[in-house]
Image (cartoon, rainbow, N blue to C red):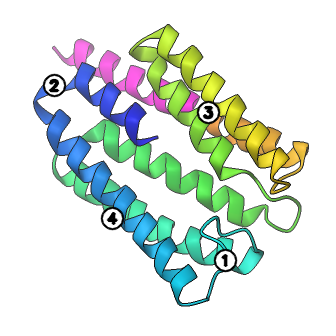
Amino acid sequence: MSSAVVCLSAVRDPGRVWTTALGLGLIAATVMAFSWRQVRRERWSHIDASRPEERAGLNRALTWLLIAVAAVAAWRGMRELALGAALSVAMILAARASSRWCTLSLHVGFAVFAAGLLWTWSPLATLVGLTFAATVAWSRAALQRHTPRDLAIGAAAGALSAVAFAATVAHWTTAASVAA
């Protein structure tokens, strides 16, 4: 996901690429440090946060982290990053809301969302991203972390987020050209 956002940032706003890359690197490092700490403290059995109570804790932490990212990005005028973070929060909340019926694969959801973000940059990059998403889905099934239904629902959530992102950015672009 971070790589897709940096690529998109490079195309849309080259002056902010390094700021975006640094910020996303810090976010990824924060999530990894949080996960590692939970394992070290024996609150989690694995860094993957596979048990329901582990996922719930990770999803809560990610939700608050992404809300902060969306707020800071909006404040700094980085509308697309703010939108991506807000849609990521929506996917996490959808996973939490549907947890009684399925274990929506956020790994697959974020991989599909990232592939969708790459569409405006390069259709070839999107194809590579979707191949990566398929590999992620295969690994989640092979590790027996998710059922095919969980993977399909995760992919649908990611695709819906990508479509919402593209439609919102297209609306912003149209509104800006009409105003000019």
Residue 9: quadrant of the picture: top left
**Separation (CA) of disc 2 from disc 1:** 38 Å
- Which element carries disc 2, helix, strand or loop? helix
Q: Nearer the viewer, residue 34 or 57?
A: 34
> Is residue 46 toward the left or the right of residue 125 in the image?
right
Please, is residue 65 above or below residue 4 in the view? Answer: below
Kind of residue at badge 1: Glu
* Residue on which the image places disc 2: 14
**Which of the marked residues, 4 or 2, is nearer the chain's N terminus?**
2
Q: Where residue 37 appears, x then y in whole percent?
A: 47, 81
Q: Nearer the viewer, residue 156 or 128?
A: 128
Q: Which mark is residue 68?
A: 4
Kind of residue at badge 3: Val
The answer to whether residue 77 of the structure is visible from this angle is no
- Which element carries disc 4, helix, strand or loop? helix
- Please name the residue shown 67% across and 71% down the image: 55
Labelled pair 3, 4 in contact (Cβ < 8 Å): no
* Residue on which the image places disc 1: 54
